[in-house]
Amino acid sequence: MNNRREFLVKTAGGLAAAAVLPELGFVKLPDPRAGLRVGVIGAGRQGRSILGELTKIEGAEVTAVCDVDDRRMEAGLRRSAGAEGFADVAAMLASGKVDAVAIAVPTHAHPEVARQCIEAGVHVFLDGPLANTVEGCNEIVTAARSAKGVVASGLQGRSNPVYKLARTFYRSDSVRDLVALRAQQNQKTSWRTPASDPARDKALNWRLDPEVTTGLAGEWGTQQFDVFNWYTERYPVKVSGSGSIRLHKDGRTVHDTIACTLTYEDGAVLQYQATLANSYEGAYEVLYGTNAAIKLGWSHGWMFKESDAPTQGWEVYANRQQFHNDEGITLIADATKLASQGKLKEGIGLPNPSLYYALGDFVACATTGETPACVVEEAARATAIGIAAHKAITTGTEQSIDL
């Protein structure tokens, strides 16, 4: 989700663009002396990303890597010097080598692995989405209620410093009344991992298995649906959609391109689209209000003010930038201090992917006992929306969303 592509900022029609930048107060990281021993369960692509980010976090030490696939376990161990490899979750938990785990197994395996880890009393970071069924989500939520440790979801928006700062603008009069919502995730990729035998192919390519996958709406959309849930503090009540295979005609039946419409009780609409066939503009979310729109791009964020919106006061610190034929206004934290140092343009965007901040929040909460940025109850709601959207797309029928 860390899309570093530069977005074009338009000021036509009386709109002014303000880049929303994080302040240090919006970053939660652990005490470097925390010494939390973390085991990573699942060393596929996402598991290896988690390993990479954990090595950057002072206060966390990767002491174990667990995967049933030997080749993936070895790849994970190469990223975590000194860690011990395990082929079995129970053996890793019984080893006494971990205080916490980060779970990055296939989505449909989340409930069983999460339950094992919660019952073992370790702190749990569970990659998003929560599960591939509503029943699986409920199982995790129920187990988490009796957990001895912290249980956090890996839905990343809530710990992302740019998103946390931008939300303060959204919750103020800067944006005002909600008009509409829109999001997309475009990435030209296949979702297929080459495998030498049918059994390994099925295990590695579970996202292309119609029996267990939640498709693009579930695997990708859940992260973005949660951003809207968090910002608006409301949830859609129904969804319709469609999908097709536009590029990857390799025998798969899971759509590589989708579009759906999610409707709220008051009539507001969220338009969502995703594709594996084109990468233009990557991943972003937009919230349109009567005073302004906020566009979030995971490493960056902007606010586009309407010409008739009241002045908030922060505009005086604006740094103006030219984007082709348009002029944008960059909002920078501590702008006065930076201007005096001749560094006004520094600090735009995040230095790390949003996964880093989600893991940092988890490690910090595991060591202090605080509530994590995304609790599993909220992750279950976002996941249920993704599941309903996937069903609407695959069946061609409108689905009610009952949260």
Image (cartoon, helix red, strand yellow):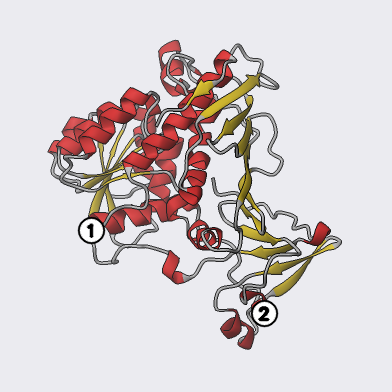
Residue 367 is tagged as: 1
| Amino acid beneath label 1 | Thr
Which numbered mark, 1 or 2, is in the foreground of this view? 2
Residue at the (51%, 35%) spot, across then down: 236
**Residue 136 vertical placement versus 6 (above, below):** above
Indicate left or right for 106 with 322 as reference: left
Looking at the image, the residue that sits furthest to the right is 325
| Residue 150: percent from left, percent from top | 24, 48
Q: Which of marks 1 and 2 is nearer the N terminus?
A: 2
Query: 316 and 36: which one is in front?
Result: 316
| Residue 373: percent from left, percent from top | 36, 52
Q: Quadrant of residue 398?
A: top right
Is residue 154 something that shows in the picture? yes
Residue at the (54%, 60%) spot, across then down: 166
| Residue 279: percent from left, percent from top | 68, 38
| Amino acid beneath label 2 | Val
Give the labeled residue for mark 2.
Answer: 316
Kindly state the secondary structure of the residue where label 2 is placed. helix
Residue at the (44%, 52%) spot, across then down: 158
**Residue 245 vertical placement versus 41 (above, below):** above
Looking at the image, the residue that sits furthest to the front is 266
Kindly state the secondary structure of the residue where label 1 is placed. helix
Residue at the (42%, 70%) spot, across then down: 25
| Residue 245: percent from left, percent from top | 66, 19
Query: 131 and 367: which one is in front?
Result: 131
CB atoms of marks 1 and 2 within 8 Å: no
Is residue 35 something that shows in the picture? no
Q: Residues within 10 Å of mark 2 (few under 14, many from 20)?
A: few
If the image is split into quadrants, where does the C terminus sit? top left
Residue 301 is tagged as: none
- Tell me the distance, in whole angstroms, between the alpha carbons under discs 1 and 2: 40 Å
